[in-house]
Image (cartoon, rainbow, N blue to C red):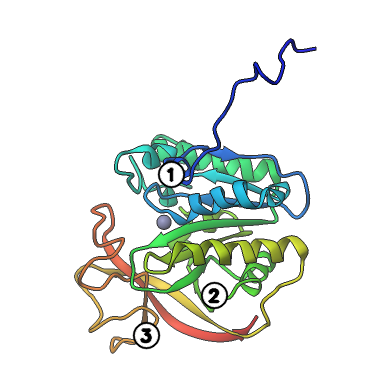
Amino acid sequence: MSGFTNEQAPITPPLSVEDFMRGEPAEIIGADQNPKILVVWPHGDEKLGPRLGHYMQTERPDLLQHVDYICGNPRAAAKEPSVRYVETDLNRSYKPQNGVPKSYEEKRAQRILEQIDDTGYDYVLDIHTSRSDVDRFFLANRRTAAVDAVIAASPIDRVVIMPDHIVDVSLIGRVPNAIALEYARSVPEEQGVEECTLIIDSLVSGVSQVKPHEREFFYVTRTIPRDDEPTNGRNFELCPEGYYPVIYGGINGGTYRNDPSKKYVGFAATSMERAIL
Ligand SMILES: [Zn+2]
């Protein structure tokens, strides 16, 4: 007997979607059924990841048998207003100098990698909201079986394949089962939550609810420097300079243009191929 009755038990109010956006809870860990999936959102000022976490906890707790959830950067999310990161961009913090994490985000990255190592997730979904004028797309380091399974389970038709030398500091470069999802802020967040849930449901059941169809794979080879921008560059459209700009903000803004730690304004995909998935 614990000595507590129901009347005496402390009452914990359910966490709201605003709590999730402020980084609370920092983690929901408890998946004990295969396949196992990790949902992580690294940037403190992005809203799709916390919305998905709140949705699973309140509407689809059954999914938490398979899905663990991590707010990558609780400190950045808790700022008022929330910020992308506090010391170093978490998504560039997965390979600290000399292997020793120093910044807050480098320590968080190490914690996330340890959780991934310990649990051995079948799939890692790295959830982002983008300031670029794009609809929605995936980012991966290469096409692994896990990456292809996530793409096949989704209605998203564009995939950006990033080279080792750019993403060796990022989650997708360190974890072969990881794939990033980028949703433009203009896409309604309800749609993002619905599509992420569709992907998770398909991965859990092993049966995709999306018919195989043509997808576009854009192969990035380099960054777009601030002083060498494409003429009338538009994301995913071949520019006169002979490449496809991706995650490119255009002259009016964009995630990277407004970030003084970045020497580039986007990435250049120098080839594109189509595949049925
Ligand atoms: Zn992000």
Q: Is label 3 or label 2 in front?
A: 2
| Residue 68 position (above or below residue 263) | above
Q: Which residue is mark 1?
A: 18
Few, some or many residues within 10 Å of mark 3 (<14, 14–19, 20+): some
- Name the residue nearer the viewer: 250 or 231: 250
Q: Is label 1 or label 3 in front?
A: 1
Of marks 1 and 3, which one's residue comes earlier in the chain?
1
The extreme right residue here reads 1
Q: Which residue is mark 2?
A: 156
The extreme bottom residue here reads 240
Q: Which quarter shows the N terminus?
A: top right
Of helix, strand and loop, which one carries label 3?
loop
| Residue 191 position (above or below residue 230) | above
Q: Residue at x 50, y 52 (%)?
A: 51
Few, some or many residues within 10 Å of mark 1 (<14, 14–19, 20+): few
x and y percentages locating residue 146 in the rendered image: 67, 64
Q: Which residue is mark 3?
A: 237
x and y percentages locating residue 169 in the rendered image: 46, 53
Q: Residue at x 19, y 70 (%)?
A: 227
Mark pair 2, 1: CA separation: 27 Å
Q: Quadrant of ligand 1?
A: bottom left
